[in-house]
């Protein structure tokens, strides 16, 4: 949860009652992102277009409660979504996940059944190729995981090169 302690979330899509797509969306709440998760109209439009393109329907919104439990707040219920999916991070190392159907602004718990992804291949929709971890040698995957861990724990640093023949009109992407 790289956004922790801020709330984070996104849109869930699928078919019937099976979640098949998780679309993370950055929190647009700027006043108090540690206590609220906000989406804008364009987020929903892009999400719905993505789901439609891939033959899926909108199932609901998921978001985190960084210091709380996996239960909808009054604000969550006020948004009139049919389903809410909440990840409670009261203990961020043991997250709780819960699903609710919203009936007349009341949260009705829904049973969650996890289906094994064995036999499925996760595909990058942009390239049509299997996810990177299926294609990298084990050593490279371990190095990538270590780099990500270092980055998330703020241990990763980059050496900055001194610009060569630089003047104020030169643009360089070399950091």
Image: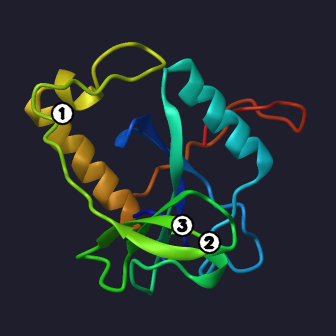
Closer to the observer: label 1 or label 3?
A: 3
Q: Name the residue under label 3.
A: 102
At 45% from the left edge and 86% from the top edge, which residue is drawn? 67
In the rendering, at what x and y percent does residue 77 appear? 61, 73
Toward the front, the furthest residue is: 104
At 69% from the left edge and 44% from the top edge, which residue is drawn? 44
Q: Judge by depth and name the residue closer to the eye, 133 or 125.
A: 125
Report whether 19 appears left or right of 133.
right
In the rendering, at what x and y percent does residue 166 appear? 77, 34
How far is mark 2 from mark 3, CA to CA? 6 Å
Q: Name the residue under label 1.
A: 140
In the rendering, at what x and y percent does residue 84 appear? 50, 63
Q: Which mark is residue 104?
A: 2
Toward the right, the furthest residue is: 169
Quarter of the image for residue 144 reads top left
Element under disc 1: helix
Q: Crowding near pointer 3: few (<14 within 10 Å), some, many (20+)? A: many
In the rendering, at what x and y percent does residue 112 appear? 26, 58
Closer to the observer: label 2 or label 3?
A: 2
Answer whether residue 121 is visible to the viewer in this image: yes
How far is mark 1 from mark 3, CA to CA? 45 Å
Quarter of the image for residue 106 reads bottom right
How far is mark 1 from mark 2, CA to CA? 51 Å
């Amino acid at each position: 949860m790289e956004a922790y302690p801020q709330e984070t979330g996104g849109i869930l899509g699928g078919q019937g009652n099976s979640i098949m797509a998780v679309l993370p969306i950055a929190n647009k709440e700027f006043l108090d992102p540690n206590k609220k998760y906000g989406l804008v109209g364009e987020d929903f439009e892009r999400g719905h277009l993505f789901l439609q393109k891939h033959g899926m329907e909108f199932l609901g919104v998921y978001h985190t409660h960084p210091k709380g439990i996996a239960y909808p707040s009054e604000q969550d219920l006020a948004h009139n979504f049919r389903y809410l999916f909440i990840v409670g991070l009261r203990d961020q190392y043991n997250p709780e996940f819960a699903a609710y159907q919203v009936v007349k602004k009341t949260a009705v718990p829904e049973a969650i059944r996890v289906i094994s992804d064995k036999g499925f291949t996760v595909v990058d929709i942009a390239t049509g190729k299997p996810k990177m971890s299926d294609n990298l040698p084990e050593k490279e995957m371990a190095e990538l995981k270590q780099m990500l861990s270092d980055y998330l724990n703020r241990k990763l640093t980059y050496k900055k090169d001194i610009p060569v023949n630089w003047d104020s009109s030169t643009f360089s992407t070399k950091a």
